């Protein structure tokens, strides 16, 4: 009986480069994104070697509270909260302090180590910063939680105030590549986003910035996203996979497959070997039955719902982590 031997690439060469903190080239990045599906197990095994070196089998849990919903003047094509979106979402101003505190208590119950306070809008006003600062101080006094704030484009002065209040991390995603940015939004620039990340670093807050994959970008632009985040030297990288929402500009965009998403996660691990890689929005919809495999490259997930979309039941996340032989950080 004739047998066929599967030809595989030596993905370990990328693991070795990553462990020496050598940057993956564009040609190599495209090789990863275009890996044959038959090679996915060997690719993820190599990515896992890097993940294990820096994080072992620990999985970090994060929980989001949508602290202000809708009412956003920006025109981001993916977002259900955009002024241009024709969506039926709940809209409300910044939540009261007691609600934010209850959210922190829920994060503790769900074993999340980081509580993410997220607001819609271009950027928080001085009054909103006052409210967030007040809530953060109380949370930090009462609970051993890390606080991540995501409040839009902020000046250095406002970022400094968050630092003084005890905010540990600030998230401001680049979302896409610089060359694709104008296809996604026109009401702010790519540099506006990068400048906010730089302000965060100056203030001494841990910088968090990530992407949304699946918005019509090319493989080369996916590589450029990973490269930009490496150059920005952010500590945490949420990798979102587009969850196209009816009523948004990108409502008909549906080009991702579970295997491609795994290749993206492997690329981001090789490019940013010692950083927190978090599988974020769109995880359940795009990775589907392969969610667990994503954790061989990534070391972090959100538990519970996202902003205006539902996440997987958090007990299922615990089971997934346990089944993999991993453990919650």
Image (cartoon, rainbow, N blue to C red):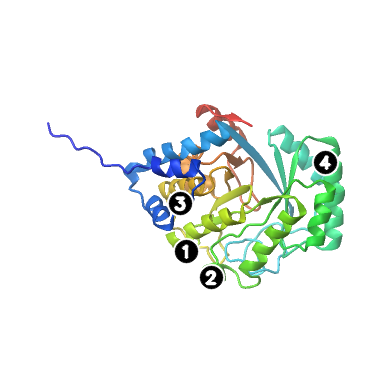
Instruction: Determine crowd level at label 3: few under 14, some 14-19, many 20+ residues with C-alpha closer than 10 A.
Output: many
Disc 1 vs disc 2: Cβ atoms closer than 8 Å?
A: yes
Please state, as top left, top right, bottom left or bottom right, where the C terminus lies in the image. Answer: top right
Q: CA distance from mark 1 to mark 2?
A: 9 Å
Q: Nearer the viewer, residue 80 or 136?
A: 136
Disc 2 vs disc 4: Cβ atoms closer than 8 Å?
A: no
Q: Earlier in the sequence, mark 1 or mark 4?
A: 4
State the image coordinates of residue 11 (x, y, percent, origin top left).
Answer: 38, 42
Report the residue marked by disc 4.
Answer: 139
Dot 1: what SS? loop
Residue drawn at (72%, 63%) of the image: 153
The image quarter in which residue 128 lies: bottom right
Instruction: Determine crowd level at label 2: few under 14, some 14-19, many 20+ residues with C-alpha closer than 10 A.
Output: some
Disc 4 vs disc 3: Cβ atoms closer than 8 Å?
A: no
Dot 2: what SS? helix
Report the residue marked by disc 1.
Answer: 216
Q: Earlier in the sequence, mark 2 or mark 4?
A: 4
Q: Earlier in the sequence, mark 3 or mark 2?
A: 3
Q: Comparing marks 1 and 3, which lies closer to the viewer?
A: 3
Image: 55 above or below 254: above
Report the residue marked by disc 3.
Answer: 24
Q: Which mark is residue 183?
A: 2
State the image coordinates of residue 266 (x, y, percent, origin top left).
Answer: 46, 45
């Amino acid at each position: 009986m004739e047998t066929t031997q599967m030809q595989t690439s030596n993905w370990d060469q990328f693991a070795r480069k990553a462990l020496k903190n050598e940057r993956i080239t564009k040609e190599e990045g495209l090789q990863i994104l275009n890996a044959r599906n038959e090679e996915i197990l060997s690719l993820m095994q190599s990515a896992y070697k890097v993940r294990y070196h820096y994080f072992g089998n620990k999985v970090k849990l994060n929980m989001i509270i949508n602290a202000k919903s809708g009412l956003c003047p920006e025109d981001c094509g993916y977002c259900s909260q955009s002024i241009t979106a024709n969506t039926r979402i709940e809209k409300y101003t910044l939540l009261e302090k007691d609600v934010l505190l209850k959210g922190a208590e829920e994060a503790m119950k769900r074993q999340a180590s980081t509580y993410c306070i997220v607001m819609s809008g271009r950027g928080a006003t001085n009054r909103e910063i006052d409210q967030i600062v007040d809530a953060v101080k109380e949370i930090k006094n009462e609970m051993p939680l890390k606080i991540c704030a995501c409040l839009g484009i902020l000046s250095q002065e406002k970022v400094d105030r968050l630092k003084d209040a005890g905010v540990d991390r600030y998230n401001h995603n680049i979302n896409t590549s610089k060359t694709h940015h104008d296809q996604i939004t026109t009401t702010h620039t790519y540099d506006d986003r990068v400048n906010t990340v730089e302000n965060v670093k100056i203030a001494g807050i841990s910088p968090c910035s990530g992407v949304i994959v699946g918005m019509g970008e090319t493989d080369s632009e996916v590589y450029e996203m990973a490269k930009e985040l490496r150059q920005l030297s952010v500590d945490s990288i949420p990798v979102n996979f587009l969850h196209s929402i009816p009523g948004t500009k990108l409502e008909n965009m549906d080009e991702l497959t579970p295997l491609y998403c795994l290749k993206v996660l492997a690329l981001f691990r090789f490019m940013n070997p010692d950083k927190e890689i978090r599988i974020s929005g769109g995880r359940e919809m795009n990775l589907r039955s392969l969610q667990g495999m994503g954790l061989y490259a990534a070391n972090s997930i959100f538990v519970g719902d996202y902003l205006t979309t539902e996440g997987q039941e958090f007990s299922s996340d615990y089971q997934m982590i346990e089944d993999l032989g991993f453990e919650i950080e």
